[in-house]
Image (tube, rainbow, N blue to C red):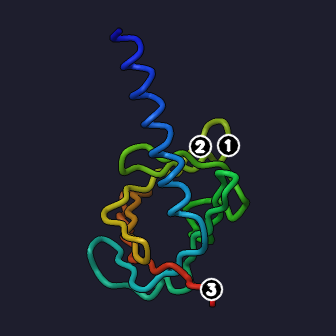
Amino acid sequence: MSITLLIACNGEDALLVRRQKARLHGTWLLKEGYRNNRLTETLKGVYFRFDSAGTMQTNLPVSSEDVLPFTLTDSTLTQKINDQTQARYVIGSWTDTSMVLRIEHHGITLRMHLGKQIIQ
C-alpha cells in the first residue's frame, strides 16, 4: 500500500511541475534589476523566455543566449549550459504576471524583478 501512495505522490509532483512550467511559459521582461542589493541600470533589457518544450533563453550575460533545457525544483530554476556548467536561479516570488529571480555569479548577487509579457 505504501508503494501505491508513493507512486501517487510522485505522479502529483510531476503534475505540479508540469503546471508550474506551463505558468512559466512565455517571455518575462526586466522591470527592475539589483546588483548586490543596489538598483542598477546595467541589467536593462534583460529577458527570460520559456517554451512548452522545457527550454529557456535569456540574454543575461552570466548565461548562454542559446535556447537550453531547464529544470524546476521547489524554488530553483536550473539552466543546463553544458555538461559541466549550470546557471541556478532562485525564485523569490512568483505570480501569473510577476517574478523575482536571484542568481549569484562570481561573488555578485543579481536580483531581477520581471513582468510577464502579455500578448494581446
Checking the image for residue 85, the label placed there is: 2
Question: Could you tell me how far apart the alpha carbons at marks 1 and 3 are, in whole angstroms?
Answer: 32 Å
Expressed as whole percent of the image width and height from the top left, the position of residue 93 reads 31, 65
Identify the image quadrant of the N terminus.
top left
Q: In the image, 36: left or right of 71?
A: left
Expressed as whole percent of the image width and height from the top left, the position of residue 7 reads 45, 21
Question: Could you tell me how far apart the alpha carbons at marks 3 and 2 are, in whole angstroms?
Answer: 33 Å
Expressed as whole percent of the image width and height from the top left, the position of residue 117 reads 56, 82
Residue 69's place in the image compared with 107, above or below, is above
Which type of secondary structure does the marked residue at label 2 adopt? Answer: loop
- Determine crowd level at label 1: few under 14, some 14-19, many 20+ residues with C-alpha closer than 10 A: few
Residue underneath mark 1 = 82
Residue 97's place in the image compared with 101, above or below, is below
Which type of secondary structure does the marked residue at label 3 adopt? Answer: loop
The residue that appears at 72% across and 59% down in the rendered structure is 67
Query: Which amino acid type is marked by label 3?
Result: Ile
Residue underneath mark 3 = 119
